[in-house]
Image: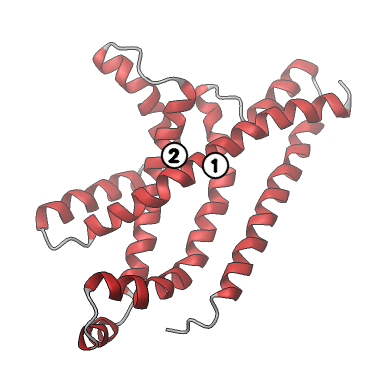
Amino acid sequence: MSFLEVTVNLLDGFKTSLFIFFITLLGALPLGLIIAFGSMSKVKIIRTITRTFVWIIRGTPLMLQIILIFYGPGLIFHTNGLGRLPAVLVAFIINYAAYFSEIYRGGIESIAQGQYEAGQVLGMTKTQIFFKVVLLQVIKRIIPPMGNEIITLVKDTSLARVVSVTELLKAAQDIVGLKAIIWPIFYIGAFYLLFTGLLTILFRFIEKKLDYYKG
């Protein structure tokens, strides 16, 4: 099997990895913010349920969650359940939303109460205070931990193979098993390194742009 043929096969798997990556971010980023507000709710029952949910998701392996979401509905309710890729996407979105929610919550709660009070003195509404005073400071503070989680997500996409979704790593494993060659396993490292490298540059650029928010 030629280098070009291997590359084409791996690119097909990489497309699936990228799809999982971007759909996860698209779903998990806003859902995580909603969960964060639930965790900070003044209503005790909402706060307790939300924090328990986050504790369960963060305390169990993502691989286990993928397996449960894919096999669980069919075994429990005797239905067809979700397809392989949809099950993976649901598991990833729920998992990363839980992690993102804690990052959001930490960032929001790190803002000094005096800044909220100052906004109120100036006659600003709570919404205005959040978007005009608090939000950009929160974004600056959460960029480093958020960047770490997003880079981890790149590598976690390989877990989709547990339910036979052909992402980058499974594509390489299939070639190794079929053609009895080992080098594609090392070759996929270049794909991961390139993508994570680009993300690292992007997050450093964003951090630099937000350097003037020292709050």
Q: Position of residue 145 (x, y in %)?
A: 48, 63
Q: Of marks 2 and 1, which one's residue comes earlier in the chain?
A: 1
Q: On the rendered structure, is 192 left or right of 56?
A: right
CA–CA distance in space, label 2 to label 1: 9 Å
Q: Residues within 10 Å of mark 2 (few under 14, many from 20)?
A: many
* Residue positioned 89% across, 24% down in the render: 2
Q: Position of residue 99 (x, y in %)?
A: 39, 53
Can you identify the residue that label 2 sits on?
92
The image shows residue 171, relative to residue 153, as above or below, that is above
Count of numbered labels shown in the rendering: 2
Can you identify the residue that label 1 sits on?
21
Q: Position of residue 97 (x, y in %)?
A: 38, 48
Q: On the rendered structure, is 184 left or right of 170?
A: right
Q: Quadrant of residue 166?
A: top right
Q: Position of residue 100 (x, y in %)?
A: 40, 55
| Element type where label 1 sits in the image | helix
* Residue positioned 49% across, 26% down in the render: 85
Whether residue 168 appears in this view of the structure is no
Classify the position of the C terminus by image quarter.
bottom left
* Residue positioned 37% across, 69% down in the render: 107
Classify the position of the N terminus by image quarter.
top right
Q: Amino acid at mark 2?
A: Phe
Q: Nearer the viewer, residue 105 or 53?
A: 105
